[in-house]
Amino acid sequence: MRLNEALISRQVAWLLKWLEEPILKWFESALHQLSLGGERQVSIDKLAIEWANLSAQAGRQCADIEASVVFVSLFDRSLSITELIRQQLLCHTLLLLDVSLRYRLFKLCLRYADDSEKQALVKGLDFLDMEGVCQPVIVDLCRTNNTELFASIALFNAWPAKHFSDVEFEQMLLKALFSHFNITSILGLKQRHTQRLSQLTFDYLSERALAARDWPMSIYSAIERRHLTREQIERLVCLPPQVQASLSLH
Amino acid sequence: MRYFDPHIHMISRTTDDYEHMRDAGIVGVIEPAFWQGQARTHLGTFIDYFDALIGWERFRASQFGIHHFCTMGLNPKEANDPELAEEVLAILPRYLQKEGVVAVGEIGYDDITAQEHHVLCCQLEMAKTHGLPVLIHTPHRDKIGGTKRTIEAIREVGMTESMVVIDHLNELTLPLVMETDCWRGHSVYPNTKMSESRMVALLTEYGTEKMIVNSAADWGKSDPLKVPKTGNKMREAGFSDADITQVLFNNPIDFFAQSGRISKEEVNRPIKVDQTQLWQENSALRGQSPVIER
């Protein structure tokens, strides 16, 4: 599990510059505490518990500034200060470990995390795991019923498009539609788009239309008419005029 | 009119629901084993859940005059944890023997992964071994593909099609199942599955043979009265009482009666409610006066 260490260093530096007392002092002592654990070579399980404890403390420490959200090029997406601290605490812990042990720690931290903590971690996947080692556990996390957590994986996150298989990416897209998300916020959709993705999305659109139910307007961005099967083109005639009109434009 | 809801997760519902269901004419239910809204991480939580389905929940239903049966299985969402899945598969046979367990289910596909396929096929084999019917869930995503794969899996394992109900069908997937000998399940559920009107339209187009309707009510925003409400909609559309009884009472019981553990006679026999009874020293009442029917 390889981390983007250069970016992480810049993020920590940004945090140390941005944070004010008393949170700054707490953050520095938290990093020190984790370093001590690494030096003493405590077990992976204890490191995960240590991270979970500090992560929970981060939520309480930042309660007053939780509403503030940072969005800078350094982070590629909007993040709360709490999320940023949680990510950096984990990065710090992972970097204390041999590469071969990092995935085990990451999995344990996810296991001990509540959903808001999981959201923080998955938002950082692009610099936490540059090789896609965490793919099985993130695919599993996509099965959550928590739409905010799922959104953290699926939207404004470059990592799934880089590391999910075609089938996994299709499932993520379909679940995003099912969750009424704006799928134009799925990064890498254009690059991962396939004929099969068009067909699956069209089937979903047909189901919704035949049931007289609504669908996200962004659905059309995942359907290319030329990709549809003959049977689907025939079915299109039975769908509402707005669907036919929208698809004639794509 | 008597109704039977062959797919409802009562463990997530309240005693008010049981009372309203009985008032609406529901005299029996089948509760398929399913997931709990978030993934379980230990075998023990499955064991306790399965025990509750055949124990406390069955008792609780009886306290409101409703016959309770269940199906046992490992649901597709949680099938994706290979280690845990193997542990659950290992203990399932002991539950398939229990009183009140009338099928294997609900099993099937969710993400349509190779691991889900493995777990589905293992459970179809178990159903064959135990001579039980099977309740199969079709996925929310890639529903057409999932339904086709389900039919392929049934044929791959050599499961008798008439021993299978394929559930959560809609306008696009019902025609696929109509080409098989499987029974056809439909969930009338707000927003995500069928509505009463659409269900009536399907019955009008495809007839009533092997057609089954359920509420699939669970811990989500759902309605445990969808079966009687569908009955009302059928009546408005001109279906006879005999048709309504066939679809909303006889068909589901006839299907699950293939287990040899449920019959129309049994479900028709009223339960005499006696709320003074206890289950493991526990009552469903909280200080209310117990109802005792003589």
Image: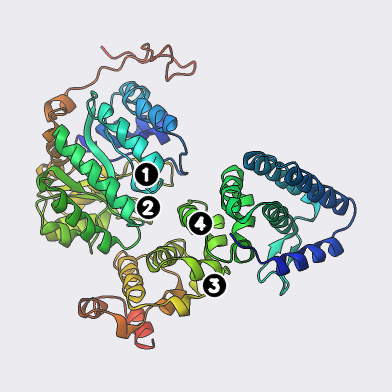
- In the displayed orientation, state which residue is furthest to the right: A21
Circle 2 is placed at which residue position?
B190
Q: What secondary structure is marked by label 1?
A: loop
Q: How many marks?
A: 4
Q: Where is residue A123 in the image (x, y as percent from the top left)?
A: 61, 61
Q: Please state the chain letter of the residue tagged with numbered disc 2 in the rendered image.
A: B
State the separation of the CA atoms marked 4 and 3: 18 Å
Choose top left, top right, bottom left or bottom right for residue B257.
top left
Q: Which of marks 2 and 1 is nearer the N terminus?
A: 2
Residue occupying image coordinates x 40% and y 63%: A171
Q: Where is residue B157 in the image (x, y as percent from the top left)?
A: 15, 48
Circle 4 is placed at which residue position?
A138
In this view, A37 is above or below A118: above
Say the numbered circle drawn on residue A185: 3
Q: Which of marks 1 and 3 is in front?
A: 3
Q: What secondary structure is marked by label 3?
A: helix
> Is disc 2 on the same chain as disc 3?
no
Asked whether A38 or A205 is in front, the reply is A38
Residue occupying image coordinates x 26% and y 47%: B120
State the separation of the CA atoms marked 4 and 2: 30 Å
Q: Which of marks 4 and 3 is nearer the N terminus?
A: 4
Q: Position of residue B64 (x, y in %)?
A: 33, 24
**Residue type (three-letter) at the residue carrying disc 4:** Ile
Q: Please state the chain letter of the residue tagged with numbered disc 3 in the rendered image.
A: A
Residues at circles 3 and 2 in contact by the CB criterion of under 8 Å: no
Asked whether A51 or B265 is in front, the reply is A51
Q: Nearer the viewer, mark 4 or mark 1?
A: 4
Q: How crowded is mark 1: few (under 14 residues within 10 Å), some or many (20 or more)?
A: some
Residues at circles 4 and 1 in contact by the CB criterion of under 8 Å: no
